[in-house]
Amino acid sequence: MSEVQARFREEVSTGLGLTLSDPQMEQYETYFNWLVEWNEKMNLTAITDQEGVYFKHFYDSMMLLKLQQFQRSGTLLDVGAGAGFPSLPVHIAAPEIEATVVDSLNKRIGFLNELAQALGTSNYRAVHGRAEDFAQQKNFRGNFDQVTARAVARLNILLELCLPYVKVGGHFFAMKGPEADNEISESSKALQVLGGRVVDLLKMDLPGGQGSRNIVVVEKVKDTPKQYPRKAGTPSKSPL
Ligand code: SAM
């Protein structure tokens, strides 16, 4: 095991309170190797060094597991997961979570489904399409205990893409940078219209001063009216 892997295991234990087994550590290393290899053929990530991938992608994603509201079981949808962030690092640590990814870039969907097979996980699947479209399907709408998104859009836009999927009583977790406070302020209309309520804003630091992240926790308090999300492209062109 490399020095970076050993430090990652240690930081996950002390910082997140999670004990990773040897097979889980092997899964993270497979993920890292696939990411670097496939990145030569398609654009998956700008970060390709082991330290960066383990901390700025894996650990960063796994900070969700520290939240009191975050369940380590049930159904999870990751909107715009790209190369699998945050859902795949979370799923490796908490394999009981039944995870689904929706992303509009088909190559990334292919990468994730093949990788999930290589990791030997049967309850991680990725589907190709726009969040605006899947949200109108019966088996998607209002069907997820938890929904996540990292680096996809500003909060008022994200809420329209993500809240329709959440069961009433469930949560949406938006992984944000330093602008989170402002984004919450500009989201009051979206929250009210779509049936969400911000219940927490958590600032968490990456180990070794590698930056910090704000996680906005939104509870779904009532059903989202049928007309949302509006048709593909409208939420970002004309945000609520
Ligand atoms: N969440 C990943 C991360 O943190 O590394 C990927 C972030 S990447 C900047 C944004 C991703 O969101 C892209 O893979 C893009 O295809 C996807 N995306 C953007 N808008 C979308 C939409 N309306 N429906 C589905 N996927 C979308």
Image (spheres, helix red, strand yellow):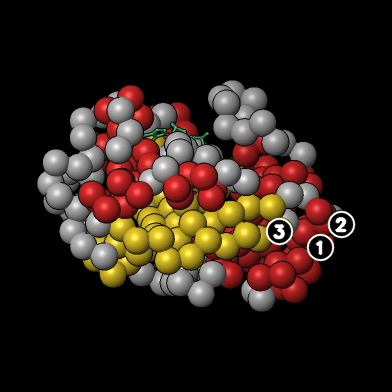
SS category of the residue bearing label 2: helix
Q: CA distance from mark 2 to mark 1?
A: 5 Å
Q: CA distance from mark 3 to mark 2?
A: 21 Å
Q: What's the amino acid at mark 3?
A: Asp
Disc 2: which residue: 3
The quarter of the image that holds ligand 1 is top left
Q: Are marks 2 and 1 in contact (CB under 8 Å)?
A: yes
Task: Please rate how many residues cluster around mark 1, counting C-alpha atoms within 10 Å: few if below 14, some from 14 to 19, many from 20.
Answer: few
SS category of the residue bearing label 1: helix
Task: Please rate how many residues cluster around mark 3, counting C-alpha atoms within 10 Å: few if below 14, some from 14 to 19, many from 20.
Answer: some
Q: Position of residue 126 (x, y in %)?
A: 38, 45
SS category of the residue bearing label 3: strand
Q: Earlier in the sequence, mark 1 or mark 3?
A: 1
Question: Height in image: 216 above or below 70?
Answer: above
Q: Are marks 3 and 2 in contact (CB under 8 Å)?
A: no
Q: What's the amino acid at mark 1?
A: Ala
Q: Quadrant of residue 136?
A: top left
Front residue (pair 142, 116): 142
State the residue at coordinates (20%, 42%). 228
Q: What's the amino acid at mark 2?
A: Glu
Task: Please rate how many residues cluster around mark 2, counting C-alpha atoms within 10 Å: few if below 14, some from 14 to 19, many from 20.
Answer: few
* Of marks 3 and 2, the one in the foreground: 3
Q: Quadrant of the C terminus?
A: top left
Q: Position of residue 94 (x, y in %)?
A: 51, 68
Q: CA distance from mark 1 to mark 3?
A: 19 Å
Question: Height in image: 228 above or below 191?
Answer: above
| In-image side of 189 versus 84 (left or right) | left
- In the rendering, which numbered label is found on residue 6? 1
State the residue at coordinates (48%, 44%). 183
Disc 3: which residue: 205
